[in-house]
Image: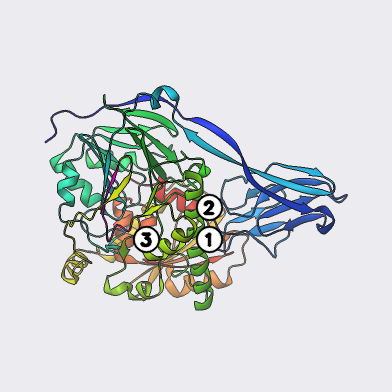
Amino acid sequence: MKEEALSVNYAGTFIGVNQKSAHVTIYNIDELSPGFNFSEQHIIKLTPDKKIEWVTSRICDHANGTLEPCAEKNTALCPLHGWKLDLEKLHYTNVNVKKGTLNFDVSNNTINVEEYDTYLQLPDDLYKQQKEQEIDIRFIAHASLLFKCGDINIVTDPWLKGPCFLNAWWHKPAPSNDALKQLLNADLLYISHNHPDHMHEESLLYLYEHRPDIPIVIPDFKTKSTETPLKNIGFKNIIPLAFNQIFQVGKHKIFISILKSGDFRDDSGLYISYGKKQAVITVDSSALNHYHLPKNIDFLATSFAAGASGHPWTFDHYNHDKKLEITSKRHKSVKLSILKYILACKPRSYMPYAGYFSEDAPRDQFIKKNNKKNSPHDIKQLIEPEHPEIVFIDPTITDHIRIDSSIITSNTNIERADHIASETIDQYLSYENFPDIALFFQKLMEYFEHCKYTDELILYLIPCDCDFSQLDHGLIINFSGSCKPEKLTSDEINKRYETDAITQRQLLIKVRAKLLWQVINHQKSWEELSIGFHCRIHRKPDVYNSDFWYHFSNIYIK
């Protein structure tokens, strides 16, 4: 038991440094047409008299996909998740995000698109306080790292026992055999967001039983989507930190900052500085802080696997070839993001993390077979030819790194299993329960009646067995009306989805009833269902219904 909890105190604000990039893209105006022009990297809008109105990047602001011209007039579409950009307003139509423009100048009938590198820097007064020190970093499991800064142990995102996403994700490899010991020895915990592979209830209940007063730093999300579940467990020493501010850990010369993901989602990353050594972990964030990050750091860890989504393999309106195409594009998109992080941070060492799981439950073998992921070796082959100066750390081989004036990696030989035993999986699956069917539908209808959500969206919800065989009945919920659910037979719901002539968007979700019960009964996030592959989804039109998923994953939760 730790005798005294650490304090975390405001210490300052990053200095933002703008540096003109050496990269300039040149376009000949004679080769462009009035309207919207798509080049390999940019979208350029010309007026009817061929004046340049704006230039923007073709990179989608969600997951780094490439925006493509859409059949719908004046619209671009990202094929990864269906984000749709209104090119007249430069605003995404299905999510409240505006797309930024780029600086350019025009001379000699050419457009010169200049891009700037913006990076963060510790204020001089904080940097000068630092003396040369070592940081030890241990890979514990998945997204859980241990940063040992002198006598202070900081642990991140502890999913350290059992499965997550309602028995869908299983560790591969398993946590180190001393994982729970390392958790209990932590002086400070960082939790990045509310996904259960980062804020894992079973692991946190174990921690609360032994260390109820442990200080936990979290992002200060407006929705309280991370804070509220931690309070419900019983933790009292929860410390929400404002984004991009610098905080000192106790009286130690350890400085941390939480950075926001570059999109609308509740996600974050962490910066740590100790002894003139700097580390950044991006967690699952898309374009963390818009890639405006500290430069010339010592350690960078990013997600890499590209398999942490129900899209596209749980979406029934895509055929198999389309799903393969989307998966391939996603792999390339994640690799592009990694290269962008490396360019932004210029790290001395790099570790792929937050992607070590497998869909090992027998009912998810279709997903396991098809939901291919990038491997650490894939990422090593991506980075080493372009950046041979970076020390690449595969945590499945070398799970310990010591950073001093030079970088030394060493295998700690901490024992861990390669995967979770099938007996353990069967045991967890046996705990799943389902109530009397009348009680289930009573609770389900009450759940939507009290959801306080409005949208031009109709949800067609069909509960199913674990193999997606439909139960007899389901619900239709019109969120543009009273949200009072309409109970119908499953066959009637399917027919209504196909034949309803309406202007609202339509979302058909077939969902495993046992897992839906867990979500509505405990008011959990609906991303437990979608990321856990417990749904089969069809949508009209094929666009991401971001407000729906955000509300039922970050707002209407406990």
Among numbered discs 3 and 2, the one appearing first in the sequence: 2
Residue 408 in the image: state x and y as whole percent: 29, 48
* Secondary structure found at label 3: helix
Residue 302 in the image: state x and y as whole percent: 40, 52
* Secondary structure found at label 2: loop
Name which residue lies at 21% across and 67% down. Answer: 425
Is residue 317 among the parts visible in the rendering? no
Q: Is residue 32 above or below residue 420?
A: above
Q: Is residue 515 above or below residue 126?
A: below
Q: Give yes or no for residue 277 being in the magenta stretch.
A: no
Amino acid type assigned to the residue bearing label 1 in the image: His
* Span highlighted in magenta in the image: 394-403
Q: Between marks 3 and 2, how big is the CA–CA gap?
A: 20 Å
- The residue pinned by badge 3 equals 529
Q: Is residue 162 left or right of residue 272?
A: left
Disc 1, disc 2: CB below 8 Å? Answer: yes
Residue 475 in the image: state x and y as whole percent: 43, 63
